[in-house]
Image: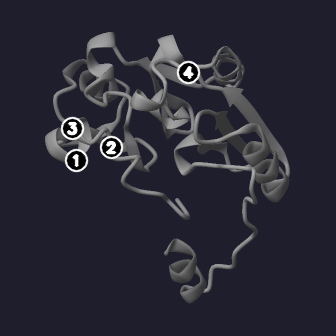
Amino acid sequence: MLEAWTSGAGIPTLGRIAAPGTADGGDTFWLRPDLLCIGRTLRTNSEGARQLAHLVGGDVRVFDVPYWRGPGELVHLLSVISPVADDLAVVYLPLLPVGLWELLRDLGVRLIEVPDEEFATLGCNVLAVRPGVVVVADGNPRTRRALEAAGCEVHPYAATEIGVNGSGGPTCLTRPILRG
């Protein structure tokens, strides 16, 4: 259990999401150190987003993520955006909430657009291990070239079994606690 590990490491628990609220880690990311983005999806409901925003405090933005194909092919907020540096994000524009697109534009965040044919092979699921250093699912050559052209150091991995077949990319398989 993550809470037992964090407590053992001296990291306090800030709070919990109580029923009927639900919140999924794949629906949250920090765009700036003081700006949390939350996606309202099939796994993060309005009450969960409200409770999480209250726990975090400060500038929290909630965006509705499209229903798309429903529970069978669930889309999280991190299914359609992966911030990879302070001013750079990988996005799948057809499913990106308009309000989030506007926020990115207003903050001057450059966008690397994932082509339609690379969305299903986790082209948008990019893990930044530090700003500009990323882990990507192999088999997404256009997204990889765009990342490299933007100055990123790209590390591909074979994503066939756990990733593509199990629908879990590198951001789904990790959860940064603190990124320096």
The answer to which image quadrant residue 45 occupies is: top right
**Cα distance between the residues tagged 2 and 3:** 8 Å
Observer-nearest of 80 and 133: 80
Kind of residue at badge 1: Ile
Residue 63 horizontal/vertical position (percent): 70, 28
Q: Residue at x 73, y 65 (%)?
A: 16
The answer to which image quadrant residue 167 occupies is: top left
Q: Earlier in the sequence, mark 3 or mark 4?
A: 4
Tag 1's secondary structure?
Answer: helix
Which residue is tagged 3? Answer: 165
**Tag 3: Cα neighbours inside 10 Å, few (<14), some, or many (≥20)?**
few
Q: In the image, is 155 to the left or to the right of 105?
A: left
Tag 3's secondary structure?
Answer: helix
Q: Residue at x 58, y 41 (%)?
A: 43
Residue 90 horizontal/vertical position (percent): 44, 27
Q: In the image, is 1 to the left or to the right of 125?
A: right
**Cα distance between the residues tagged 3 and 4:** 21 Å
**Tag 2: Cα neighbours inside 10 Å, few (<14), some, or many (≥20)?**
some
Which residue is tagged 1? Answer: 162
Q: Residue at x 40, y 46 (%)?
A: 171
Tag 4's secondary structure?
Answer: loop
Q: Are marks 3 and 1 in contact (CB under 8 Å)?
A: yes
Q: Earlier in the sequence, mark 1 or mark 2?
A: 1
Q: Nearer the viewer, mark 2 or mark 4?
A: 4
